[in-house]
Each structure stands twice: as structure tokens, then as C-alpha cells.
Amino acid sequence: MPPPPAHHAKDLFAHPYYARGSGGGATHAGTNADVAGAMKWFERFVGDNALGIKPKVLTFNLLLQCAAFRKGGSDLGAARKIIQTLERYGVQPNDHTYAAALKVSARRAEGPGLRSAKEFRGVFEGKYGLTPGPKTYRSLIELFDRAGKVKTVDELYRKAQREGIDLGVGTGQHQRVLDSTILKTLERVLGGKEK
């Protein structure tokens, strides 16, 4: 993969070609994300600060997406390192950051990681004072659905409704794919097909 021109380096992580590293695969479609390659590019362009680039929250959101969608299961160790790096650079996370970290917990090869989700909750809600937004609720629902916690899925859905959070289908291609999965889960849960 050729390096981007220096004047484009600030947009490095906004472009999926560079974010996916040399291993190929999309970072949002759920196949083959190369978190090691993405981290390599991050260190190359941001780590030594030779180009004067300060990473933004989008940078870390995309890196966490790479960790979540790694081929063979998510990379929890990389996600923890990414969050530590975010803290080191003093970047304020947002709902997308929180949701991406929860996706790492949900998509682990050995099964959903409820402990890591609790750890991430402590970081994002405890340290940064974030409250779950639409993306975070969708990730939480996916996590608990994968863990077989149907009652919790139902409680999360109802809590989001009470808080006026819309969990409906979004406008982006990837969001529609994720939401259709969540909507099927909610349909199954709320339709009484599971107890």
C-alpha cells in the first residue's frame, strides 16, 4: 500500500483504504479489518508528531472499528491500547467511540465479553461522563443479544424508548445493515418468540 501524500495525512483515518492496512477488508462491513496495519499507520503519521498531526475522535473511532471487525474475532487488547492512546492525546470520546468499544466486546471470537463491556462502561460513563446514545444502545443490544441475554435486550430497548432515543434504521449503508440485525433481535424479543 503506498503511503498517502503528506498533505493528505490529516485525513488518513477518514479514508478506509488506509485504515484497513495492508491486509485488506473493510473496517465497517465486518470482514477482515487490519487493526495492526491501522495502528502502524497511526504511529507512522501521528506517533512521532513529525507532521504536526493531532488525532481527532474520528481517528480513534475508526481504529476501534478496526479492532471490532478484525478477521477471526475482535481484538480486545488492541481496543484497550487504542483507548489508552486516546486518553494520552487528551481526545474526548463520543457516542461513536463508546459504541465501537462495545462492538469489540460483542464480536470476540470466544463469545461476547460482558466483563470488557463493563470495563468500557467504567471508562466512558465513569471517567468521561458519557451517557449512551443511539449507537451505544444499538451496540449494547447487539452485545447482550449475542450473549443470549434476551431480558436485558428487552430492558435496553424499553429504556431507550423512555429516554426518547431512536433506534430505528439510519441513513448510512452500514448503519442499515447493523440496524436490521438489531431490529430482527427486537422483533424476536418483543414478539414473544423468546422468553
Image (cartoon, helix red, strand yellow):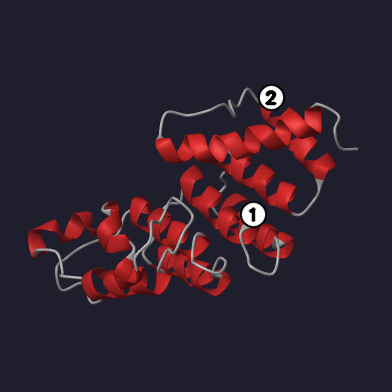
Q: From this viewpoint, which residue is outermost toward the right?
A: 195
Q: Position of residue 111 (x, y in %)?
A: 71, 64
Number of marks present in the image shown = 2
Q: Quadrant of the N terminus?
A: bottom left
Q: Nearer the viewer, residue 62 or 72?
A: 72
Q: Residue at x 32, y 54 (%)?
A: 56
Q: Specify which label sits upstream in the sequence, 1 or 2.
A: 1
Image height check: is 50 above or below 89?
below
Give the labeled residue for mark 2.
161
Amino acid type, callout 2: Gln
Q: Secondary structure at mark 2?
A: helix
Q: Nearer the viewer, residue 96 or 88?
A: 96
Q: Is residue 4 left or right of residue 189?
A: left
Assess whether mark 2 and mark 1 are in contact (beta carbons under 8 angstroms).
Answer: no
Q: Which mark is residue 121?
A: 1
Q: Residue at x 51, y 67 (%)?
A: 79
Q: Distance between the Cα atoms at labels 1 and 2?
A: 20 Å
Q: Nearer the viewer, residue 8 or 51?
A: 8
Mark 1 Cα within 10 Å, few/some/many (few <14, many 20+)?
many
Q: Quadrant of the C terminus?
A: top right
Q: Is residue 110 left or right of residue 189?
A: left
Q: Is residue 56 left or right of residue 105?
A: left
Image height check: is 172 above or below 112?
above
Amino acid type, callout 1: Arg
In front of the other: label 1 or label 2? 2
Mark 2 Cα within 10 Å, few/some/many (few <14, many 20+)?
few
Q: Position of residue 93 (x, y in %)?
A: 45, 51
The answer to whether residue 131 of the structure is visible from this angle is no
Q: Position of residue 100 (x, y in %)?
A: 51, 53
Image height check: is 109 above or below 161?
below
